[in-house]
Amino acid sequence: MIKIYSDAAVNGNPGPAGAGCLIIINGQQHQFSHSLPATDNHHAEFIAASWAFEQLAQFKPNDQIIFFYTDSRLVSDAIGKGYAKKYAAELSQLLELIDQYPTVVTEWIPEKLNHGAHQLALQALHQSHT
């Protein structure tokens, strides 16, 4: 079983952004942070989610069940419905990445339960300002 937590942080809306993801495989944590160009919060959340799945690929997870956690209701709902009116291209890219794996369970979580990914996103945002 693999757990992925992703989050984005934006300074302003739109503004400079950062993405963070925490990937847990067999109890071992892997942390990633990445600066993003200026964008709005919703776009940044989609980009962070896609980027998290791109990071997962390096671990070659094979047929393991993947649990994907996000504190973005828009991203979570869009994955479930397969539709996002204003972010169709971003959702399409994300679903293409998700479809590479046999079983991905997406779950919305409150922000307070996504602390690790959030801190990584803030770290990336801060690094983009220095």
Image: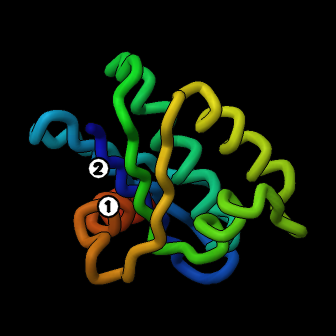
Percent coordinates x, y for residue 84 in the rendering: 82, 65
State the residue in front, 36 or 75.
75
Residue at image position (59%, 25%) is 100
Image side of residue 106 versus residue 127, left or right: right
Residue at image position (67%, 61%) is 80
Disc 1 packing (10 Å; few <14; some 14–19; many ≥20): many
Percent coordinates x, y for residue 129 in the rendering: 43, 63
Residue 56, above or below 86: above
Image side of residue 28 versus residue 64, left or right: left
State the residue in front, 17 or 107.
107
Q: What's the mark number on residue 22?
A: 2
Of label 2 and label 1, which has the lower sequence position?
Answer: 2
Residue 53, above or below 121: above
Secondary structure, mark 2, is strand
Residues at badges 2 and 1 in contact (C-beta under 8 Å)? yes
Q: Which corner quadrant holds the N terminus?
A: top left
Say what amino acid the circle numbered 2 marks.
Answer: Leu
State the residue in front, 26 or 16.
26
Using the rendered image of the protein, determine whether residue 64 is visible from the camera's viewpoint. yes
Residue at image position (52%, 41%) is 51
Q: Indicate how the structure is coloured in the image.
A: rainbow
Q: Residue furthest left?
A: 27
Q: What's the mark number on residue 117?
A: 1
Q: Which corner quadrant holds the C terminus?
A: bottom left
Percent coordinates x, y for residue 35 in the rendering: 48, 51
- The residues bearing labels 2 and 1 have C-alpha atoms spaced at a distance of 6 Å
Percent coordinates x, y for residue 33 in the rendering: 36, 48
* Count of numbered tags: 2
Residue 116, by quadrant, is bottom left
Say what amino acid the circle numbered 1 marks.
Answer: Ala
Disc 2 packing (10 Å; few <14; some 14–19; many ≥20): many
Using the rendered image of the protein, determine whether residue 127 is visible from the camera's viewpoint. no
